[in-house]
Image (cartoon, rainbow, N blue to C red):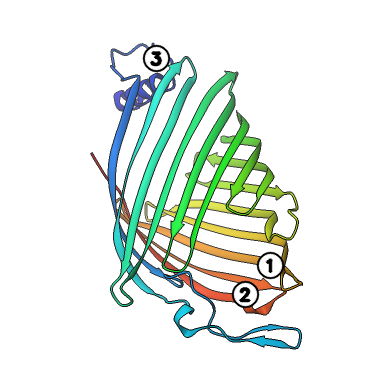
Amino acid sequence: MTLNDALLLDTLLKREGYADGIGLPNQVARNSYEPYVTPIIDYSTNINGGNPSRPLVLGSFEFTGDDANLKREGIIGGIGAGISGRSTVGEGRYLDYGVNVSYAHSPEHDIGITRRSANVCSRTNVDNNWFVDACADASGLERELTKDSTQGLSINTAKLFSTDNGAFHSVNIGVRRNFAEAYEQNQLQLGLSTVRNNSFYSSVNVSFGEAVVDTLVMRHSISTTIGTTLFDRALTTTRGYSFSDGGKLLGFEREDTTRNININYVITPMFSVGVGYRQNTSSINYFDEAEPVFSVQLAPVRF
């Protein structure tokens, strides 16, 4: 182990409440926070929260929307700002928290997207690499035609362990109470993550949601992530599947199945790009979508 590795391990242990670390005279604050700003460059397929550019067909009825309410797409740019921090409570016990707000503007349409989020988590190492997390979060999305907000409370337990093939694993189970503007829902969440010595990473996360009367909600979803390195840069592939049901529109039942795939590559420590594809198939074909996804991520500037 090099001196830098020892300093890193000592710092990590002290940030998790173990005051002595590995015994190095390395001072680590019990309370710390870090402001940051993040440049935003992206392409949005629905900047204004508008409707699809086709008629709504329900049985023998056909409805045509106002052209002013059709969705707008294009390049958006802006900036986000926030703060993240940690407060050590005791040995193996600490609080993580964060707040973020961002605005991205479309010069072509002269409209923008505002996002807000906040979260706080109490993390406890209860015994022998068993962890319990209790978290609260809130997020909001505001566009020209729509405004959405969601809050959530969750509790998760996770076990860390290793296997003889040089792999390290985390298995977790948790429950979440989701508070949307029009409904509340309980969810069960399961996950398994694995890191190997050859820089290979994988994870599987599964969620189940309870039914909500006359409301379209997620009933089950699964996402998988595989990460490795290419030319010494991180390459990540994520695939997702989600099924939602329970919705009704003028008496017609709605079910949606969403599939997506995304590939992200870190070109430099400050710059990464992503490409992907997203498809939504609905029992009401007005809500069908099939679109490519492009993204550019710029690393936050921290102070």
- For image coordinates 42% across by 77% down, the residue present is 72
Out of 111 and 8, give the one closest to the viewer: 111
Relative side of 146 to 297, left or right: right
Quarter containing the C terminus: top left
**Mark 2 Cα-neighbour bin, 10 Å: few <14, some 14–19, many ≥20:** some
Residue 184's spot in the image, x, y percent? Answer: 65, 47
290 relative to 118, above or below? below
Q: Mark 3 points at which residue?
A: 22
Residue extending furthest left? 303
Relative side of 250 to 201, left or right: right
- For image coordinates 64% across by 36% down, the residue present is 171
2 relative to 282, above or below? above
Relative side of 200 to 254, left or right: left
- The answer to whether any part of residue 164 appears in the image is no
Out of 78 and 131, give the one closest to the viewer: 78
Quarter containing the N terminus: top left
Name the element at disc 2. helix
Q: Name the residue under label 2.
A: 287
Q: Mark 1 points at which residue?
A: 256
First in sequence, mark 2 or 1: give its number: 1
Residue 164's spot in the image, x, y percent? Answer: 62, 31
Name the element at disc 3. loop
First in sequence, mark 1 or 3: give its number: 3
103 relative to 201, above or below? below
Out of 152 and 77, give the one closest to the viewer: 152
